Image: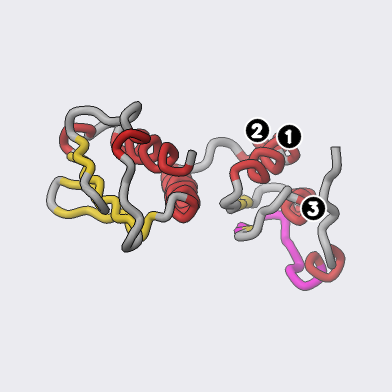
């Protein structure tokens, strides 16, 4: 398997001057090349890696697996950040202009001229979800405990 070698690694490490308890955010995780080296310098610190490409994120996750136990489970705030990044990436691939809330509704809006295909969504539609030409309305109260999963499934279905 081919693994990307990080560019300018020595310069990046020198510039960052990583200390053992630092907290680092790698907003361009890629396959984890730089992050792998960052983790070699951390002992009690934390690393948050962000990647929008699911396939590359999967490879980075495998590459950095040995550090998972070392740093423990991410706190809820970080899990929420991961979720938001995942939704933004999926939404971009699906031609979604915005995901917002109004009263008790989560509203997904498509860019002008990109209607929703109800037939394509039929497998994930259920009571509490209304599909219009350019909007999908999800009743938050109906899906209170599982709204994140419902939202992600809907958007993912629009990508496929």
**Which region is colored magenta?**
14-25
Viewed as shown, does residue 117 lie left or right of 142? right
Counting from the top left corner in percent of width and height, residue 22 is at 65, 58
Please tell me whether mark 1 or mark 2 is closer to you in this view. Answer: 1
Counting from the top left corner in percent of width and height, residue 103 is at 13, 51
Please give the residue where the numbered disc 3 appears in the rendered image: 37
Disc 1 is placed on an element classified as: helix
Counting from the top left corner in percent of width and height, residue 20 is at 72, 55
Residue 81, visible in the rendered structure: no
Disc 2 is placed on an element classified as: helix
Along the viewing direction, whichever of 6 and 66 lies nearer the viewer? 6
The quadrant in which residue 14 appears is bottom right
Marked residue nearer the N-terminal end (1 or 3): 3
Q: Residue at x 37, y 35 (%)?
A: 120
Please give the residue where the numbered disc 1 appears in the rendered image: 66
Within 10 Å of disc 3 (Cα), the crowding (few <14, some 14-19, many 20+) is some
Along the viewing direction, whichever of 117 and 159 lies nearer the viewer? 117
Spatial CA span between label 1 and label 3: 13 Å
Counting from the top left corner in percent of width and height, residue 17 is at 76, 67
Spatial CA span between label 2 and label 3: 17 Å
Q: Are marks 1 and 2 in contact (CB under 8 Å)?
A: yes
Q: Are marks 1 and 3 in contact (CB under 8 Å)?
A: no
Within 10 Å of disc 1 (Cα), the crowding (few <14, some 14-19, many 20+) is few
Seen in the picture, residue 153 relative to 50 is either above or below; the reply is: above
Please give the residue where the numbered disc 2 appears in the rendered image: 69
């Amino acid at each position: 398997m081919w693994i990307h070698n990080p560019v300018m690694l020595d310069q990046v490490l020198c510039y960052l001057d990583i200390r053992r308890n630092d907290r680092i955010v790698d907003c361009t995780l890629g396959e984890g090349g730089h992050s792998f080296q960052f983790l070699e310098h951390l002992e009690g610190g934390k690393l948050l890696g962000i990647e929008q490409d699911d396939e590359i994120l999967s490879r980075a996750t495998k590459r950095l697996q040995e550090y998972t136990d070392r740093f423990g489970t991410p706190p809820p705030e970080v899990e929420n950040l991961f979720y938001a990044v995942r939704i933004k990436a999926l939404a971009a691939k699906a031609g979604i202009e915005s995901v917002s809330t109004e009263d008790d509704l989560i509203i997904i809006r498509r860019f002008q001229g990109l209607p929703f295909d109800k037939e394509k969504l039929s497998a994930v539609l259920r009571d509490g979800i209304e599909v219009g030409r350019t909007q999908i309305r999800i009743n938050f109260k109906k899906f209170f405990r599982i709204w994140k999963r419902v939202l992600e499934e809907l958007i993912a279905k629009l990508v496929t």
